[in-house]
Image (cartoon, grey):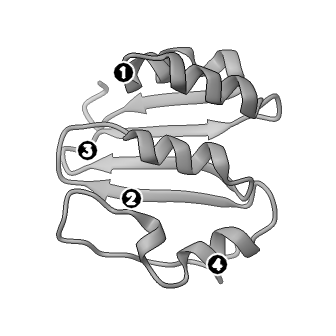
Amino acid sequence: MDLSKELSIQSRDNVINISNYDGISSLIADSPDDTLFISYCHPELIGFSYSDILMLLLNNSVKGISLIGLCGRIRILYKNKEFDLKKATDLLISIDSIIDFTENCYKVGMTYRSGGILGE
């Protein structure tokens, strides 16, 4: 595994907008398709945000994202080879909640997994 492009961001806020950090935008723009996997910790018990999913959908270089809560719960969302951007965007627009998206993402060529250290 090549970690030469590993980049760490720390924030005191509950929200990280990756476009606000030097190097992130160029890393995403300059990386080949499906080569980045973005992972971050979140102190709250919440899942992915709309902006997390948009960042994944709209950047070809980002293969997937994971969120690790301080409680040990891990959520992973990634694109499969069948990923369809138009269908994924339509799904995101049509949903009432992120849970709706993660429950239906398989229909647009994506996979969602969630679990925890306690087998949740």
Instruction: Say if 8 sits above or below 39 in the image.
Output: below
Q: Mark 4: which amino acid?
A: Ser
Question: Given this view, does label 3 or label 4 mark the residue nearer the observer?
Answer: 4
Mark 2, Cα crowd under 10 Å, few <14 / some 14-19 / many 20+, is some
For the residues bearing labels 3 and 4, Cβ distance under 8 angstroms: no
Q: CA distance from mark 2 to mark 1?
A: 21 Å
Q: Which residue is mark 3?
A: 72
Q: Which residue is mark 1?
A: 97
Q: Position of residue 80 (x, y in %)?
A: 74, 34
Q: Secondary structure at mark 1?
A: loop
Q: Does residue 22 appear left or right of residue 44 in this picture?
A: right
Q: Which quarter of the image is occupied by the N terminus?
A: bottom right
Toward which corner of the image does residue 6 lie, by quadrant? bottom right
Q: Earlier in the sequence, mark 2 or mark 1?
A: 2
Q: Does residue 95 appear left or right of residue 77 in this picture?
A: left
Q: Mark 3: which amino acid?
A: Gly
Along the viewing direction, whichever of 18 and 2 lies nearer the viewer: 18
Q: Which residue is mark 4?
A: 26
Q: Earlier in the sequence, mark 3 or mark 1?
A: 3
Q: Which residue is mark 2?
A: 40
